[in-house]
Image (spheres, grey):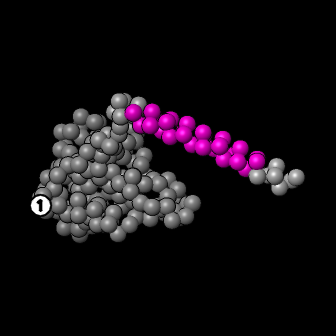
Amino acid sequence: MYAKLAPKGKAAILMPNGATTSNTEDDRKVRKAMLEAGKVDAIIDLPDKMFSNTGISVQCWILNKAKVDTDVLFINATKLGTMISRKLRKFEDSEIDLIAETYHKYKNDEGYENKLGFCNKASLEEIKEKDYSLNPGRYVGVDNSNQLSEEELNEQLKQTATELFTLMDESKELEEKVREILKNEIK
């Protein structure tokens, strides 16, 4: 695909996840050559079930023959999308806009910022340190900011247990009332 591009051409190619991390010598050599030549613009990790003909997740590689640097934008979009059937997921327009806007900000150097768990611009040196792996998860990290601390979790557990005990007591009272009503109906 890359060889078929015009001198300033771009291509977005869907690849299986394994292509970004395959350790076979030939695959690694191809990734290394493309990265060192600065022709990989971005790798976007897509969620599973995005395509009706396969349930596996894939990655979108954006290649650019006119690119002049060796930085790569990594986007992890695996948490995006809405299931529209048991077998198919679809991006909302706002999610497509988010991915496109992130890419365009990165390309145009206009207000792009790394976002933990979603996107990260990595240098060739960082990619070399990870043995030329192009798996976005290795670069964007994990955003744990919305996870509860142990204290918060324990407090929520106590509140939930209290609510459950209250509901169980109410359930017993209601059960007794229903029994009384049924006994009176039978007599």
Q: Can residue 71 be seen? A: yes
Query: How far across and how far down the image is residue 5, in percent?
Result: 27, 67
Q: Which residue is label 1 attached to? A: 110
124 shown above or below 80:
above
Q: Amino acid at mark 1?
A: Glu
Magenta-colored stretch includes residue 167:
yes
25 shown above or below 93:
above
Split into 4 quadrants, where in the image is the N terminus? Answer: bottom left
Neighbour class for label 1 at 10 Å: few (<14), some, many (≥20)? Answer: few
Query: How far across and how far down the image is residue 55, in percent?
Result: 52, 56
Is residue 145 left or right of 121 when viewed as pictured? Answer: right
Q: Of 17 and 93, which appears nearest the observer?
A: 93
Going 55% across and 64% down the picture, which residue do you hit? 85
Q: Is label 1 in a helix, a strand or a loop?
A: loop
Is residue 127 left or right of 168 when viewed as pictured? Answer: left
Query: How far across and how far down the image is residue 32, in percent?
Result: 27, 44
Q: Can residue 11 be seen? A: no
The image quarter in which residue 100 lies: bottom left
Going 23% across and 64% down the picture, which residue do you hit? 101
Q: Of 72 and 161, which appears nearest the observer?
A: 161
Going 49% across and 61% down the picture, which residue do you hit? 83
Magenta-colored stretch includes residue 115:
no
Q: Of 31 and 111, which appears nearest the observer?
A: 111
Residues in magenta, as a range? 155-180
Going 66% across and 41% down the picture, which residue do you hit? 172
